[in-house]
Image (spheres, rainbow, N blue to C red):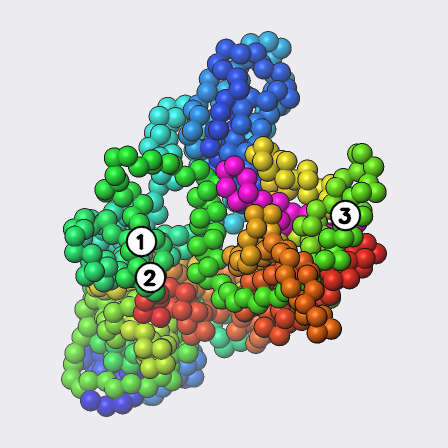
Amino acid sequence: MPEITMPRLSDTMQEGTIARWLKKPGDTVSRGDILGEIETDKATMDLEAYDSGVLEQILVQEGETASIGQPIAIIGTGAAAAAQTQQEPPARTAAASNEQRAQPAPPVSSAAPAAPATSGQHEAASAGNGAIKASPLARRMAEEYGLDLSQIHGTGPGGRIVRDDIEDYREQQSTAQTPATTAPTPVAPTSPTQARSPATPVAPATSPAVPADAEVVKMTRVQLLIAKRLTESKQTIPHYYVSSEVDMTDLLTMRQTLNASASEEGEKITVNDLIMKAAALALEKFPEVNSSLKDDFFIRYKHINIGMAVDAPTGLVVPVIRDTNIKGVRSIARESKALIAKARNNKLAPADLEGGTFSVSNLGMMDASTFIAVINPPQAAILAVAAARKQFVPIDGQPVIRDMMTMTLSADHRIISGATVARFLQEVKRLLQNPYSLLG
Amino acid sequence: MAEMTYRQALHDTLREELLRDENVFLLGEEIGTFEGSYKITAGLLHEFGPRRVVDTPICENGFVGMATGAAMLGLRPIVEIMTINFIILAMDQIVNHAAKIYYMFGGQCPVPMVIRTPGGGGQQLAATHSQNLEVWFAHVPGLKVVAPSTPADARGMLRTAVRDNNPVIFLENLALYNVKGDVPDGDYTISFGQAKVTKEGRDLTVISYSRMAAVALDVARRIEQENGLSIEVVDVRSLRPLDSETIVNSVKKTNRAIVFEEDWLSFGVGAEIVSRIQEGAFDYLDAPIKRVASVEVPLPYSKPLELAALTGAKQLVEAIQELAPRRRR
């Protein structure tokens, strides 16, 4: 009897949430039918049937979470006995070959496929995100001091909470209690930060006192992931920022000409497309900027894949345009339009989101005059692009109206130095101010 | 109190026991005329004569059997097996006879016998002459297995072994024979089943025995000076009986533990100690217990390969750095 298990839909996926079921028990299912939708850490994906038959049982309900390989539904032999093509969930063997080492491998669910009875107990786990890992000592200490382990950030292997974390938390608690005497609750600051500024009041996660008229919105998995990655980025990457003003007048003129001459179906080129192209060409000259840090090494990427920050309904996503440097601006325009549409409809596939080596964030269309962006790890830098605004600029001693734009690069100081960043920006600026070089 | 080598401590103890009890006698290969492959028995044939110091043919199964019979009839033989690698030939006598006779004959006939033998690698003696097989014996009820790491412990524990009424495997180590240490005066003995905290510490416990206990103590002292990490070292000294209490109490204090052993990792002494710790100190553990042991290969002859395969100070230091609690690092 074919069991449908939670598929691995992306490299980083460990578990998935059933966004919704499109079939209900009793429905006839043919191979290739879409059974439902699964929300992963990156995107919402269709769950396809690999067997034909009758959907007999749904083991994991909408909104519930299951780890990879865990059975989520059963297709029975209503019709032509679904030719025993059942495969075991993959990736098991790989995990088994590593037996000796006690490395903190991602928790491969060992959920016995023989147990539909387990479906009930996942309700509890799905409320939070899985069981809390803590050393026996940490558990005992938490009990002794009356601490809620879910409020404590684990820094041990695989995020395990260890004694150090309990001690950190208690220290943090005692410092935090001094300014806020009105809050005797032991819940205290929730942020996983090793609080450089414990005086700053941090909103508790399960705030004990939410005003009755306030709306409480549960974060989605994607939002949780974004929150986690951004916090990690700002806390672990030594960010610094270099800005540059660009005269966009010629580029805007060129864009108008290009778009005017485009046929009906021809894709309109946006300013952002041209900026992405300029950044890509500059990255060719500055491989240091197109790199990452891994352990003791700089990883310099051969491909230049630029991610663009898109404001999707579920939160910020950064789909990637591969090999931006060797694509023409028309192709970039076409691709970015398609990616934005996918992002808006929540249809981005993990492949659309992977492999970025640099990012561009553009708030120009919202008239932002200047802003700085948070680096998208493991990348080394992100370019924040503000609006082009008409300004008087002295040219040959005369005030002339030009379209001026401020761009700011946030860079990881471990990877790139200020001088390199300045030179990189100079190159981007040169390209934008000589816009025909982008068409070469 | 006098400073002497591990070798000297063994030699002097054997001599004293030969003097103290005329039922005590020595036997083994090359221990008389040649004065022992490692010179532990130097001068004893000359002093005590061939009835008390017996050179045997190269036939471990035969002379261990002979010692077992002698012990059954009231003598107290001390057997030297040239290295633990050759003890394999006498397995049947040790495991099926010496270890079981007292039990199977309803307690009528104890077997007060000591088998002294050195283990260990690092001397370029290659795969068949460099092993650490003590765990085979520690597994067997009816035997006692002890493995002192200092001249003082060697002396006290060899006395206890000779005076014990059970077969005792007394593990020495080639690389310990020249190690010097202070040895107390007087006829002291050290009971089996008593581990010793050789250095107190707060941040983690290293548990070891025989030569690696000496290396562990060295490493712990050095790291304390260099990094300020406070490491407790437990020398278990006696594998069977094993002193769980001292080990468990130490881990209850430090919450983190490394077992450091020269034998192979799988099914080794460390596996047993880890098990005792989790049974006794589960709620005190802050991290999985680490085992540092030798690479699971027959030990190579080539010096660089031998060094790469054997565990040692370097491997222990790495494990300590990985395991030490973050706030103390």
Picture quadrant where residue B217 is located: bottom left
At numbered mark 2, what does the secondary structure look like: helix, strand or loop? loop
Residue A222 has which mark? none
Q: Label 1 near label 2: C-beta < 8 Å?
A: yes
Residue in front for this viewpoint, B204 or A317: A317
The residues tagged by marks 2 and 3 sit, at their Cα atoms, a distance apart of: 50 Å
Coordinates of residue B79 in the picture (x, y in percent): 34, 71
- Dot 3 corresponds to which residue? A256
Region of the chain picked out in magenta, as a range? A307-328
Q: Residue furthest front?
A: A398
Residue A195 has which mark? 2
Please report the residue visible at 57 percent of the width from the left and 76 percent of the height from the top: B303
The residues tagged by marks 3 and 1 sit, at their Cα atoms, a distance apart of: 48 Å
Please report the residue visible at 34 percent of the width from the left and 36 percent of the height from the top: A216
Category of crowding for the residue at label 3, using alpha-carbon neighbours closer than 10 angstroms: few (below 14), some (14–19), many (at least 20): some
Q: Is the N terminus of chain B in the top left, top right, bottom left or bottom right quadrant?
A: bottom left
Chain of the residue under the numbered disc 2 shown in the image: A
Task: Tell if the residue under mark 3 belongs to the same chain as the one under mark 1.
Answer: yes
Marks 3 and 1: which is nearer the front? 3
Residue A202 has which mark? 1
